[in-house]
Image (cartoon, rainbow, N blue to C red):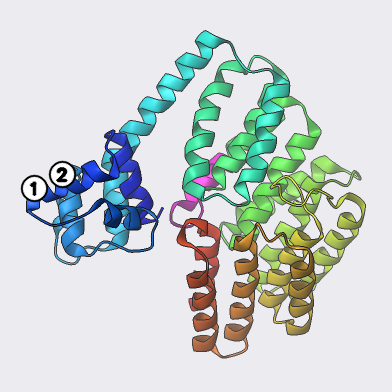
Amino acid sequence: MAVGTLIKELRRARGWSQGRLASEVNDAFGTGLGREYVSRWERCSVVPGPYYLRCLSAVLDVPLSVLEGEVKRRTFISDVAATAIAPVVASDLLSAGFAARLRGSPTIEAWEETLGTYGTDYMSMGAADIQRRVSGELVLVQQQLDEPMLWSVASRLMTLYAKTFPGSDGSKAVAWYRTAAEAADQSGDRQARVWVRGRAAIALGYEGASLGVADALADQAIAISGDQPSLGLLNAVMGKAHAAAIRGDRKTALALATQGRRIFDTVGSYEQTSDYAVPWWRMNVFLSLLLARLGDEKGAVEAQESARLELPVTLPRFATHLELHRGLMLARAGDKAGGASYAQAAMDALPPEKHSLTLRMLMDEITA
């Protein structure tokens, strides 16, 4: 979460307008802060300097550790989130859960529609926004688990929720992926059992995180699938391919990529902008990174160009993925500084609110 986004959440949690926050800072410190500057912070067009971070920590009642010496952005975010946001979110979740119980629970059809909406929103929204919304849905669906098909809904929500925890909290992502797999098993829905495991495998493999877990979940998905091709199976196979590439097992990675292409030919999606879909452009995003990791420059560039032909303009984050793949190619070819510079320029060109934790992990892989 960007500092500006966090400031906005803290302000809203107190029921303050931007003008009220500016007034609180001015009254406490005698500054000339205006509402417009608060707006610029919250839009992430300007980052507050150390002095204003100290002012904000005081008027928003955040920990004293934020006031220490050289205040780092990451410290500010983690300290404030732990002390100020969590109680607000917990309160909202409790309220939503009881309100839903009083109103009556959503039908399975309504849940499927909700899942479809999240699948679309995930492609363009930030992880923090998705995480807050899905946590509320999990509280609601938890009250309906006497119906087997609601376990299927819960498992898919859990998988999406897990996707918001990569990087610095990978253990939490893995725990949620495993819980999602167990929930899908409770549903008896083979398609859900395969999909949640496959989605976890491609997420972890693409990010280069918890490769042993990625392999295990992918193997489970493949075993459950049998001979039946599906998007879940496609994700599982491509997740294993990325894990093999990162380990340096080129032969296995290429064999799995070929298998993935065959599955895609059968089950590829027409839907273009959902996390539950794998259209041609997204398949090429998978291949682009895989081939970049393997040092196949020609194949990676072909995949990137194919992806760009059909990539919706409404999904700039995925165009940035492709640019980072090129940065990785440069770094692997020996130009480490040039690759890192190229990738950072692509990150800087993407609005901060569009950044994802997966992009940051790819950036770390390039700079490493």
Q: Is residue 270 left or right of residue 126?
A: right
- Per the image, is 174 magenta? yes
Q: Is residue 108 visible?
A: yes
Where's residue 155, x and y in %?
Answer: 64, 33
Badge 2 density bin: few <14, some 14–19, many ≥20, Cα 10 Å: some
Q: Main secondary structure of the magenta part?
A: helix
- Rendered image quadrant of residue 18: top left
Task: Specify the amino acid type for callout 2.
Answer: Glu
Q: Residue at x 33, y 53 (%)?
A: 39
Under circle 2, the secondary element is helix
- Per the image, is 236 magenta? no
Task: Specify the amino acid type for callout 1.
Answer: Ala
Q: Decide: marks 1, 2 in contact (CB < 8 A)?
A: yes
- Of residues 230 and 6, which is closer to you in this image? 6
Residue carrying label 2:
24
Q: Residue at x 48, y 19 (%)?
A: 97
- Of residues 331 and 60, which is closer to you in this image? 60
Where's residue 119, x and y in %?
Answer: 67, 42
Residue carrying label 1:
28
Under circle 1, the secondary element is helix
